[in-house]
Amino acid sequence: MNNRLTVVALFDVLGFGERVRSYGLRNLTLAYNQLTQVVRRRRNCLIIDATIPLGESEEGYPITGTALAELVVNKTYFSDTILFWAIYDRARFWTFCSICAEFFCEVLNMRIPLRGGISLGEAYMNNRTRTYLGYPLVEADRVEKTQLWLGVSFGPSFAEYPFKHYFRAEHVLYYTAHRKPGNTQYIPGFVLDWPRQWRKMYTHSLYEHLAGMNINPKYQDYYLRAIQFAELSERAERESECT
């Protein structure tokens, strides 16, 4: 695979080492098999985007066109880390965000807590040779580790022009309460609105689900921030429907 502009999503299982010690090998293997099956189910998508800018009319109004594209989502996993990546362009990016949100919710519904980071840049990603190189991997790893919650943040590469203008409101919110002190440079504040996707996928309460998972005092604040963010997401969606 060529080292083109690539969007990379890295997910880690929260408290994986403690799970190894407390779950027992058999139970951990069953949970891990479920997780990898979810990863394998992520499929390629056909995308239609009717908002591609084509220029301006004689009167100065913007002209848009429709683009048809295929999003090829690559993935791999090792130990407690899952990677998704795809060639970046504006027409494909929003679908990549949706896939990440769906994956996060499906794994959370299995009672497996995740943290994730999404980054952008030139990368060499080759599943055949198991070779994964490039700064997006470094950035995504840093972003993942500097969060005190269950959720997914976009790295500083997405705060740059023009990429910061290509988010869609239904995928991203601004949130900073989950940043670890002293690491604000890694998380500019754009985060994946995964609770909105949860509300589309499931009928049972996200709040009750998170509260039921919150059994380890060490990670209590992580779950409380996730609940706080879910409330923010719900308010933001209601407000968008009123405008």
Image (spheres, grey):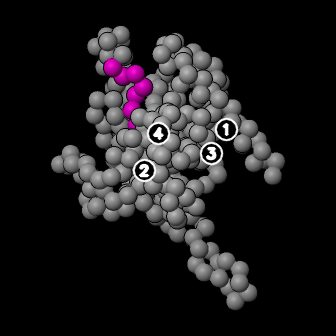
In terms of secondary structure, where does tag 3 sit? strand
Write down the residue under mark 1: 233
Write down the residue under mark 3: 173
Of the numbered discs 3 and 4, the one sitting upstream in the chain is 3
Residue drawn 35% across and 37% down? 82
Residue drawn 31% across and 56% down? 123
Residue drawn 52% across and 64% down? 161
Picture quarter containing residue 220?
A: top right
Of the numbered discs 1 and 3, the one sitting upstream in the chain is 3
The residue segment tinted magenta is: 11-17
Left or right: 155, with 64 as reference point: left
Looking at the rendered image, the quarter that the N terminus falls into is bottom left
In terms of secondary structure, where does tag 4 sit? loop
> Could you give the CA–CA distance between mark 3 and mark 4, rounded to whole angstroms?
19 Å
Q: Which mark is residue 183?
A: 4
> Could you give the CA–CA distance between mark 2 and mark 4, rounded to whole angstroms?
16 Å
> Could you give the CA–CA distance between mark 4 and mark 1, rounded to whole angstroms?
24 Å
What is the three-letter code of the residue carrying label 1?
Answer: Ser
